[in-house]
Image (spheres, rainbow, N blue to C red):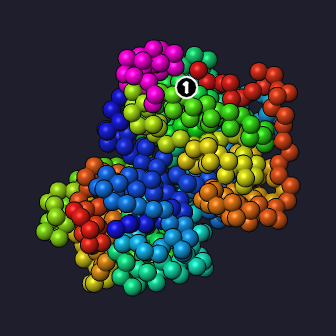
């Protein structure tokens, strides 16, 4: 894996530019402008937010092209869009359209139950989800320029994001304690390339930025993700399924920038109306858990 | 000497790493109080709209303008140049208006136009190097500048590295290149090694 190639450097470079920011799901130009005005670092163009995908069921696919174009035309910040896991043709369409980042996302219905897209073959950067370090390193091996630890999208419940952020951090810390020869069985156990396992062991971090996603509904949820080592936060249904999208969007942006200062997070949390309704993730069956998609 | 890196949003971690590799102590700047005692300030890349939402009408912006007007050395990269520009186009937006340039946002296109290219150094003695790599990510373009602004490097006809007084401004990302002379030049403005 050549992390020093110019192609990979500009992909990871854009991910670096998004650090310390909030990436917001939007479904039309008006929402995109609300997000940009609130200080979003990027928007994710979608047809339905995850909470609606979950409620309505059926097959969730790449968003309509007109919808994505409408959003690209409405804002000056980067625009991301989602393709189905393993759907290289959707990814090629999004690349041809000129979106700034592709999210190969478990929120959409997977197109391939064994393989993800070979992302090195694209000029557009990809972000992929993970539940643990092995999954993160497999996605990076395939060419992902950004990782987001998965929460349970559309749930309004932060518990899965916390579980997976902690899992990745714990596994990275453990690698740092191992002898060189012990990294070989560790790579076998993680089902990840030795070269990437060695990188994490020596650097104490992933070779690409690590953001958090899924279940963020409040400024404090976003601050918690940052406390647990996320470098930015994706917010899906949490903004436009709340009672006060513009104010909540601003509040979450403020909480991410100032996550280390409880007084700022307090001020950000003040005066908000009702958050999105939440789901008890424990009551979901394994088939209903979007975060389990991805191999 | 300690260098502050504006950490409202963007690639402040990459700047801290580039300075750290040169043995320079850094800190993150999010409030006016964080500016005290700094030998210089970095305005990083990222989203200028996000950063302006934290600066507009705030004590931090007032303190930043005061410090820079009083001669604090500045390294501005990409979005940082947009924050400093006298005028911003595509779309028009407000700024700190401390650098006499006009910039056009996203002027080279979207991410698919992001690239790494060799640049033409205009003044090798002033930069301390005759070669320079430019990492451009959704970069702005300097479309006009005052005579008091010196062009140190170009991409084609476009000025991409300029200096005005104690301000060094790059529309690309020297912090994402190994051993960029731009970072070293900034440190010499700050009066520190190398």
The answer to whether residue A30 shows anywhere in this view is no
Residue A187 falls within the magenta-colored stretch:
yes
Locate residue A230: give its quadrant: top right
Locate residue A113: give its quadrant: top right
Residue placed most toward the observer, B61 or B115? B61
> What residue is shown with label 1?
A135
Residue A256 falls within the magenta-colored stretch:
no
Q: How many numbered marks appear?
A: 1
The answer to whether residue A4 shows anywhere in this view is yes
Q: Position of residue B144 (x, y in %)?
A: 34, 76
Residue placed most toward the observer, B31 or B100? B31
Residue at the image position 54 percent from the left and 75 percent from the top: B32
From the viewer's perspective, is A63 left or right of B148? right
Residue at the image position 57 percent from the left and 16 percent from the top: A114
Residue at the image position 65 percent from the left and 65 percent from the top: A37
Q: Position of residue B185 (x, y in %)?
A: 24, 66
Label 1 environment density (alpha carbons within 10 Å; few <14, some 14–19, many ≥20): many
The image quadrant where one finds the C terminus of chain A is: top right
Chain ID at mark 1: A
Q: Position of residue A220 (x, y in %)?
A: 73, 52
Q: Position of residue A210 (x, y in %)?
A: 53, 41
Q: Which element type, helix, strand or loop, lies under badge 1?
A: helix
From the viewer's perspective, is B94 left or right of A131? left
Residue placed most toward the observer, A143 or A27? A143
Q: Main secondary structure of the magenta part?
A: helix
The image quadrant where one finds the N terminus of chain A is: top left
Residue at the image position 29 percent from the left and 55 percent from the top: B22
Residue placed most toward the observer, A215 or A9? A215
In the displayed structure, B140 sits above or below A165; it is below
Magenta residues span: A176-197
């Amino acid at each position: 894996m050549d992390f020093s190639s110019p192609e990979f450097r500009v992909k990871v470079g854009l991910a670096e530019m998004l650090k310390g920011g909030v990436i917001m799901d939007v479904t039309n130009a008006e929402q995109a402008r609300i997000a940009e005005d609130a200080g979003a670092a990027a928007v994710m163009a979608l047809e339905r937010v995850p909470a609606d995908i979950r409620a309505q069921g059926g097959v969730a696919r790449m968003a309509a092209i007109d919808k994505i174009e409408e959003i690209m035309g409405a804002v000056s910040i980067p625009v991301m869009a989602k393709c189905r896991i393993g759907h290289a043709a959707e990814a090629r369409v999004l690349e041809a359209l000129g979106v700034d980042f592709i999210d190969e996302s478990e929120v959409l219905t997977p197109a391939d139950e064994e393989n993800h897209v070979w992302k090195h073959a694209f000029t557009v950067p990809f972000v992929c989800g993970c539940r643990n370090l092995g999954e993160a390193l497999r996605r990076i091996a395939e060419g992902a320029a950004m990782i987001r630890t998965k929460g349970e999208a559309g749930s309004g419940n932060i518990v899965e994001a916390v579980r997976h952020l902690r899992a990745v951090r714990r596994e990275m810390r453990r690698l740092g304690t191992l002898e060189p020869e012990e990294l070989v069985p560790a790579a076998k156990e993680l089902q990840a390339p030795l070269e990437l396992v060695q990188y994490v062991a020596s650097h104490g971090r992933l070779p690409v930025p690590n953001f958090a996603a899924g279940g963020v509904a409040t400024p404090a949820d976003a601050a918690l993700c940052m406390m647990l080592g996320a470098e930015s936060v994706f917010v899906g249904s949490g903004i436009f399924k709340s009672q006060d999208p513009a104010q909540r969007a601003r509040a979450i942006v403020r909480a991410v920038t100032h996550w280390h200062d409880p007084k700022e997070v307090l001020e950000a949390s003040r005066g908000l109306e009702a958050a999105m309704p939440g789901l008890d993730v424990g009551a979901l069956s394994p088939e209903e858990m979007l975060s389990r998609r991805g191999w | 000497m300690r260098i502050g890196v504006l950490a409202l949003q963007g690639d402040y971690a990459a700047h801290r790493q580039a300075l750290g590799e040169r043995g320079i102590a850094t800190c993150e700047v999010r409030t006016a109080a964080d500016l005290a005692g700094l030998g210089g300030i970095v305005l990083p890349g990222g989203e200028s709209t996000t950063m302006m939402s934290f600066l507009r009408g705030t004590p931090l912006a007032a303190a930043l303008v005061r410090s820079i007007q009083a001669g604090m050395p500045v390294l501005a990269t990409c979005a940082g140049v947009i924050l400093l520009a006298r005028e911003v186009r595509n779309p028009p937006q407000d700024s700190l208006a401390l650098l006499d340039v006009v910039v056009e946002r996203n002027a080279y296109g979207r991410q698919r136009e992001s690239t790494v290219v060799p640049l033409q150094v205009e003044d090798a003695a002033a930069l301390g190097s005759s070669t320079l790599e430019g990492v451009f990510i959704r970069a702005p373009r300097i479309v006009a500048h005052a005579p008091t602004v010196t062009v140190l490097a170009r991409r084609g006809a476009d000025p991409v590295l300029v200096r005005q007084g104690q301000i060094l401004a790059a529309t690309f990302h020297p912090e994402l290149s190994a051993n960029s002379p731009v970072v070293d030049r900034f440190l010499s403005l700050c009066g520190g090694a190398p």
